[in-house]
Image (cartoon, rainbow, N blue to C red):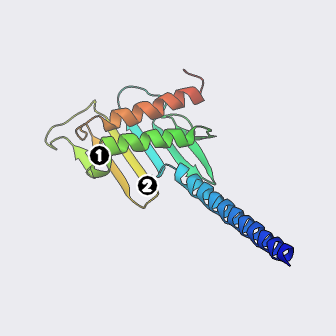
Amino acid sequence: MVLAILGSTFTVDAKKRKRRATVKKEKQVQQKEKNEKVQHCGLDMVEYNYQGMMMSPFANMRVERKDNKVVFILKGTTTEEKEFVIDDGEQILKEALKIIEEEKMLDYGVSYSLDPSIQVLDGYSWEFSAKLADGRSVSSRGRNAEPSGNGLNRISALLYERAQKLLGMD
């Protein structure tokens, strides 16, 4: 009788351990799924366009999530749009988000320009936009003027460097 009690106690303990292991495994799976979601850095799209007197092979550079992939879309001043699926897309979006946050680019105004009475014949224009996973976004543009800080230059450099690598220009 004692053996039967010990045997059933052992069986109950084994069932408890098995149940705990199952619950622990479920929690690990949930954590893994959560981590996979967190791996998306929070930036869904960043785009920078520049047009000016200096020729540039890239007038429009955009990195965005598309069909569970990250793509880099390039359009030159005289070329068709090209789309590349990139393996380091999450890293680029993460770096872009860091720049956007450090430079407070979500606070950019809608438009920047010089005093309208000043006529500029050899100027430039730019556009910047970004969409975050939490729904926030920014869209800003300018002609011959830009916001303070170094955000546009940093975003441009990040995207331009990656575009050069994609086209074998590095």
Q: Compare residues 106 and 53 and report the one nearer the observer.
A: 106
Against 38, residue 4 (above or below) is below
**Label 2 with label 1: CB-CB less than 8 Å:** no
Against 117, residue 133 (above or below) is below
Q: Residue 7: x and y, percent?
A: 83, 71
Give the label on residue 138, or none: none
Give the label on residue 132, or none: 2
Q: Quadrant of the N terminus?
A: bottom right
Which residue sits at x=31%, y=34%?
124
Q: Residue 41: x and y, percent?
A: 49, 48
Which residue sits at x=62%, y=38%?
87
Against 62, residue 135 (above or below) is below
Q: Quadrant of the C terminus?
A: top right
Which amino acid type is marked by label 2?
Answer: Leu
The residue carrying pointer 2 sits among few (fewer than 14), some (14 to 19) or many (20 or more) residues within 10 Å by Cα, namely some
Name of the residue lying farthest toward the front: 2
Name of the residue lying farthest toward the bottom: 1
Q: Compare residues 6 and 113 and report the one nearer the observer.
A: 6
Q: Residue 86: x and y, percent?
A: 61, 39
- Give the secondary structure at mark 1: loop
Q: Residue 63: x and y, percent?
A: 51, 44
- Give the secondary structure at mark 2: strand
* Mark toward the start of the polypeptide (2 vs 1): 1
Which amino acid type is marked by label 1?
Answer: Lys
Name of the residue lying farthest toward the top: 170
Question: Disc 2 versus disc 1: distance between alpha carbons?
Answer: 14 Å
Question: Where does label 1 land, which residue?
Answer: 104
Q: Is residue 74 left or right of residue 122?
A: right
